[in-house]
Image (cartoon, rainbow, N blue to C red):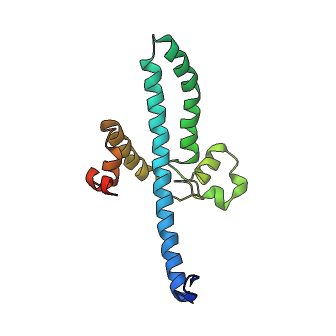
Amino acid sequence: VFDDVYGKLILKTSEVKEINAWAAAATYGLIFYASSVHATIHVLHYLCTLALKQSSEGFDELEQWANTYAAMTPNKYDSVGDLLLNSQPNILSVLMPNEANSVESIGNTFSILTGSSGMGASGDKLRPILQDMLDMWATNPTTYIQDMMNIPAERMEEA
């Protein structure tokens, strides 16, 4: 790494490789965490949309909008399951691509969080964690970020 302000090397090549390895591991963890939160936000969106649809019955102006909006939401919810989370990743579809001709097999292979060609997490272990996060959001919607990050509101205000 070269400091162009002072015109000299800051780190040796061996140190840069170590920092790159650390940065790659940290970035991988952040991407996994962000993708997990992203998947959970889609589920929350699905639940809120259904709640809006149910609660707007009898209020014609809002009900018409809610029904139109809610009509597309199940497709998005299904996509979350297919693209982000599957309980049983299928490693055989990677090893034997000719055998991987079903949509289920392809989804299990390429799911971002749980697919064998994705991050390879266990859907059975990840789902309860995401369920807890969703429960926390639904139980206390005004402070869920504070609770999720485990940072007191005062500290967040200071930042």
Q: Position of residue 68 (x, y in %)?
A: 58, 21
Q: Position of residue 114 (x, y in %)?
A: 52, 53
Residue 92 lies left or right of residue 119; in this view the side is right
Q: Position of residue 139 (x, y in %)?
A: 30, 37
* Rendered-image quadrant of the C terminus: bottom left
Residue 128 lies left or right of residue 64; in this view the side is left
Residue at position x 47%, y 60% from top? 30
Front-most of residues 116 and 77: 77
So how many labels did they put on this image? 0
Residue at position x 62%, y 44% from top? 104
91 up-or-down from 131: above or below: below
59 up-or-down from 120: above or below: above
> Which residue lies most toward the front here?
5
Front-most of residues 42 and 112: 42
123 up-or-down from 95: above or below: above
Residue 86 lies left or right of residue 106; in this view the side is left
Residue at position x 53%, y 36% from top? 77
* Rendered-image quadrant of the N terminus: bottom right
Q: Position of residue 24 (x, y in %)?
A: 52, 70
Is residue 109 in view?
yes
Residue at position x 53%, y 76% from top? 20
Is residue 121 in view?
no
